[in-house]
Amino acid sequence: MGGVPAETFTSIDALRPLKDFDERIAFFERQRQKGGREYGNYIMHWYDDYDIGSKNGSWADPAFDDSAWKTVPIPGGFKELGVADVPSLCWFRKEITLPQGAARIYLGNVDKMDTVYVNGQQVGSSSWVENPRVYFARGLKPGRNVLAIRLFNLKPDGGFISPADTLRLVLGDGTAIPLAGEWKGKVAVDGHPPQPLPPGYESVVSMVSVLYNGMLAPIAPLAITGAIWYQGESNAERAFQYRKLLPAMIADWRRLFGQGDFPFYVVSLPAYMHRKERRATIRGPKCAKPRV
């Protein structure tokens, strides 16, 4: 399972002593007690609890009346809706008339997570900021169509972060229809306190211990020769924590499989990021100029 943090492959019992995952463990245990849907991440459970745009009739429904919504510019929209300074979940809708149905939707890079609907049908979703969004627009038809985007934003300069001309709908014959401009927008969740926020904002598997419970525990005990661990990028921003987390995970696996201290090989990621030369600046007392 690629692109996941090490804590997903580590048991709750092994994570507790680290004290770094207490909030996420508590969230995990609350969801397990509720017996809700098993997403494997935090953001989807949070959507189920707080996204009013998905309750009592979805705001993606083409028959939904958005006449009372505010007209906002895309790219943009969060400032106009009054939530640019806090994490927030907003919906945007746009009605378009098309000569044909087959098309792809291009939204460029989005920060942080978008969910895109065409005539009420979800056609794509992502929380990977560096991934330019390209979605096959299933459900489009000749005539009236409604595009709806649910977007979770974390930053004042987040949301649609690519140039405006990047946002477009491309028909099967190559005709491009601009999507930048006026949309209807409405806030679904305003992140100002006391609104609870999710512990994590990824749509990929990110919840503590879920892969340990789902992929390791069911097959143990099992006679194994060793493990090869090709991982690291998803914990790269928490490298100091990883110095504790990785040894804890290794010890956890060895306890689980009961094969003693079996070999555990850690493979480094090749050329993961561009090398940066950093020159240290040494500051000290001013010295007199040397005599010549």
Image: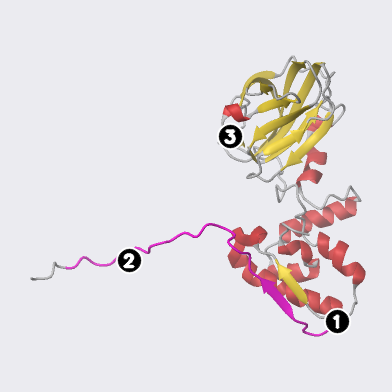
Question: Eyeballing the image, is 250 above or below 32?
Answer: below
Above or below, 172 relative to 231: above
Residue 48, located in which quarter of the rendered image? top right
Majority SS type along the magenta span = loop
In primary-sequence order, the first of circles 2 and 1 is 1
| Mark 2, residue position | 282
User: Is the Cβ of the residue at disc 2 closer than 8 Å to that at disc 3?
Assistant: no
Which element carries disc 1, helix, strand or loop? loop
The reply to whether the magenta stretch includes residue 49 is no
The reply to whether dot 1 and dot 3 touch (C-beta < 8 Å) is no
Report the amino acid beneath label 1. Gly
Q: Which residue position holds label 3? A: 162
The residues bearing labels 1 and 3 have C-alpha atoms spaced at a distance of 51 Å
Which residue is at 24% across, 67% downward? 285
Residue tagged by mark 1? 258
Query: What residue type is disc 3 on?
Result: Ser
The residue that appears at 61% across and 64% down in the rendered structure is 270
The amino acid type found where label 2 is placed reads Ile
